[in-house]
Amino acid sequence: MSWVSTRRYYELINRAIQLAKDKRTSAPLLIESLDFNFVYRLRSDKEWERATDILADAANRLKDAGAEAIIICANSMHRIYRDLGNRVDVPIIHIAECVGEKMKADEMKVASLIGTHNVMVEGFYRRRLVSYGVDLLPPDMGVVDQIDSLIYDELMQGRATRDAERLLKTIITNQSRAGAQAIVLACTELEMVVDIDANILPIYDSTTIHAQAAADWILGKD
């Protein structure tokens, strides 16, 4: 939920709405921009409980302002999806469900998941993709730590370097050699350093897929 992620979602959703309608149309959106310091690199149960309270309050403010559906602009925060859903009386569009549906439609069977530490290691995200018939390669803890540091210390602050691009290219190449047929970019900032359209493997960018799902929902309400 960095400002970088928010900016990207806003652009993608509006471009999708514009493409579906006309060049003068923009998306009807309500945005709650949270202080990222309060939801940064959560580890303990107490920290996650606090994050749940923060997101539930934010989501309910949006609902009270007229929002009819919610998207959480971060993969990692979907760890509290169920708890949040119990406290917000509007649908929440789940990012991993959107990715899983697209991968199933493409008949993609084996993939590598790249994101923050909790996304790559914990089961809350992986289980969603597996339920769509996607077999995920096990996480390499050395790679997990590298990517986690890159995301939090650089990308979420708006910094994208050539070193970061080279690192991701090496990681993706190694995952291809390990048997991955595709890469899931399960971090909303990773597209800053990964060429989605020209890579050694098909790239499923969660940000693009999630934003398109939000746009489709808006268009379906019209």
Image (cartoon, grey):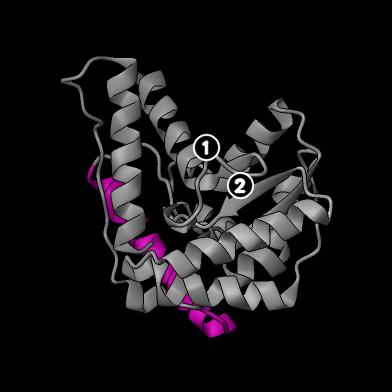
Mark 1 and mark 2 lie on one chain; the one further toward the N terminus is: 2
Q: In the rendered view, tell whether residue 184 sits above or below residue 41.
A: above
Residue at horizontal 55%, vertical 56%? 81
Which residue is label 2 attached to?
Answer: 96
Residue 33 in picture, x, y percent from top left: 26, 60
Residue 108 in picture, x, y percent from top left: 76, 35
Disc sitting over residue 197 in the figure: 1
Secondary structure under the numbered disc 2 in the rendered image: helix
**In this rendering, the label closer to the viewer, 1 or 2:** 1
Instruction: For the C terminus, give its image quadrant.
Output: top left
Secondary structure under the numbered disc 1 in the rendered image: loop
Residue 98 in picture, x, y percent from top left: 58, 38
Disc sitting over residue 69 in the figure: none
Give the magenta part as a residue range: 42-65
Mark yes or no: residue 83 visible.
no
Observer-nearest of 108 and 2: 108
